[in-house]
């Protein structure tokens, strides 16, 4: 089954929730994982089942990176806030790097997220 991670910084969580609602039929076809707070909100505000990792600042981004390193993820939607510094920026950089190393599809904005979800459906 196709596995997709959903991650969003605090300022981008509403955008990710809206994206999930708009693409819920397609996302129901996938096995989903998310960082802690993002996963909690997705399960509260949609009908999606999500495996929750730790919150990003508590190591959740690294946990998802480990899934990439083990070739257990087909894609990641990571809506980052480009206007705010993140205290766990090294973890975020590590996740982006491991996606490049393992050639894992990574969408960092809504436009690319649409392409990723559609592309995985093919």
Image: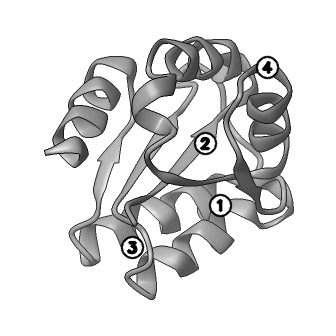
Disc marking residue 7? 2
Quadrant in which residue 48 is drawn: top right
Q: Comparing marks 1 and 2, which lies closer to the viewer?
A: 2
Q: Residues under labels 4 and 1: Cα distance? A: 22 Å
Asked if residue 52 is positioned above or below residue 38 in the image, the reply reads: below
- In the rendered image of this protein, does residue 4 appear above or below residue 121? below
Residue 107, placed above or below residue 67? above
| 101 or 21: nearer the viewer | 21
Q: Earlier in the sequence, mark 4 or mark 2?
A: 2
Q: Earlier in the sequence, mark 3 or mark 1?
A: 1
Residue at numbered disc 3:
98
Could you tell me how far apart the alpha carbons at marks 3 and 2 are, in whole angstroms?
A: 15 Å
Instruction: Count neighbours of disc 3 (C-alpha within 10 A) and say few if under 14, some if 14 to 19, many if 20 or more.
Output: some
- Marks 3,1: beta carbons within 8 A: no
Q: Are circles 3 and 4 on residues that touch, CB within 8 Å?
A: no
Left or right: where 93 falls relative to 103: right
Other-residue count near label 2 (Cα within 10 Å), few / some / many at <14 / 14–19 / ≥20? many
Q: Secondary structure at mark 2?
A: strand
- Per the model, the C-alpha gap separating discs 1 and 2 is 8 Å
Within-10-Å neighbours for mark 4: few <14, some 14–19, many 20+: few
Camera-nearest residue between 9 and 21: 21
Q: Nearer the viewer, residue 107 or 43?
A: 43
Extreme residue toward the left, this view: 122
Query: Can you tell which of label 3 and label 4 is closer to the viewer?
Result: 4
**Image quadrant for the N terminus?**
bottom left
Q: Which residue is mark 1?
A: 61
Residue pictured at 28% horizontal, 18% vertical: 111
Check contact, mark 1 vs mark 2: CB within 8 A: yes
Q: The residue tagged with tag 1: helix, strand or loop?
A: helix
First in sequence: mark 3 vs mark 2: 2
Q: Residues within 10 Å of mark 1 (few under 14, many from 20)?
A: many
Which residue is labeled 4 in the image?
A: 45
């Amino acid at each position: 089954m196709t596995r997709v991670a959903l991650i969003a910084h605090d300022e981008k969580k509403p955008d990710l929730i809206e994206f999930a609602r708009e693409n819920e039929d397609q996302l129901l076809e996938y096995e989903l994982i998310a960082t802690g707070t993002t996963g909690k909100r997705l399960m509260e505000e949609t009908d999606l089942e999500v495996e929750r990792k730790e919150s990003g600042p508590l190591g959740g981004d690294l946990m998802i990176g480990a899934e990439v390193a083990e070739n257990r993820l087909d894609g990641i939607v990571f809506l980052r806030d480009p206007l705010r510094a993140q205290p766990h920026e090294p973890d975020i950089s590590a996740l982006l790097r491991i996606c490049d190393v393992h050639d894992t599809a990574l969408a960092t904005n809504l436009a690319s997220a649409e392409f990723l979800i559609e592309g995985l459906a093919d």
